Amino acid sequence: MSIKEFAEKISGFEYPARELSNFCSEAYEKGYTFIYGMSDDNLIWEGFSVGNRGAYGGCEASIGAVSVRAEWAPDDHLGTSWKIHVDCDHEVFTIVEDGDVFCYGAVIDKSELVGGESDLKLALKELVSIVEIHQKSTGNNFAWAEIEEAKRCLDLTKTN
């Protein structure tokens, strides 16, 4: 199930949306975290990552590498209590109250929580480069005995 399909599946429950708790295990298995505002003072995230914090009047928080802004009474959605903003790829879901949107929540993938694979690969490539420079200047490989395996895993092998 894609993250979009998951967001559609959890969208539309009536406030206080207790049914969302039924999707925590599935979200965990898929690697998804869903984030939403509850009542007038709580930011909640469930699924792969779990937590909550006080958010009276709105708040900013970090969930792993993701910056979250819980906006209370957003100007662009009059009558809505919460709008969750995240600084990464996500899908939106809604919680409704008496037929109107109570909260625009966000669903994120676990890869966003650690800053994405590209950041890790970039750091490892830089490490490989440093070790190679050391290898060439000293004539030995004691700094990282598994350098060839690391290069193979990072797809850095040269075809000369």
Image (cartoon, rainbow, N blue to C red):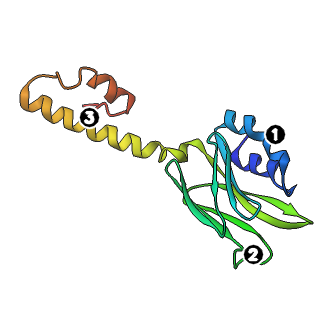
Dot 2 or dot 3: first in sequence order is 2
* Local SS, label 3: helix
Residue that badge 3 annotates: 128
* Local SS, label 1: helix
In this picture, residue 117 sits left or right of residue 22: left
Residue placed furthest toward the left: 138
Where in the figure is residue 89, as x and y percent of width and height? Answer: 59, 55
Amino acid on which the number 1 mark rests in the picture: Asn
Mark whose residue sits in front, 1 or 3: 1
Tell me, yes or no, whether the two marked residues, 1 and 2, touch with CB atoms within 8 Å: no
Amino acid on which the number 2 mark rests in the picture: His
Residue that badge 2 annotates: 77
Residue 22 badge: 1
- Residue 85 is drawn in which quadrant? bottom right
In this picture, residue 13 sits left or right of residue 85: right
Dot 1 or dot 2: first in sequence order is 1
Q: Give the alpha-carbon distance from disc 1 to disc 3, as whole Å.
A: 45 Å
Where in the figure is residue 24, as x and y percent of width and height? Answer: 74, 39
* Local SS, label 2: loop
Mark whose residue sits in front, 2 or 3: 2
Residue at figure coordinates x 84%, y 55% from the top left: 16
Residue at figure coordinates x 80%, y 49% from the top left: 10
Amino acid on which the number 3 mark rests in the picture: Val
Q: Residues within 10 Å of mark 2 (few under 14, many from 20)?
A: some
Q: Residues within 10 Å of mark 3 (few under 14, many from 20)?
A: some
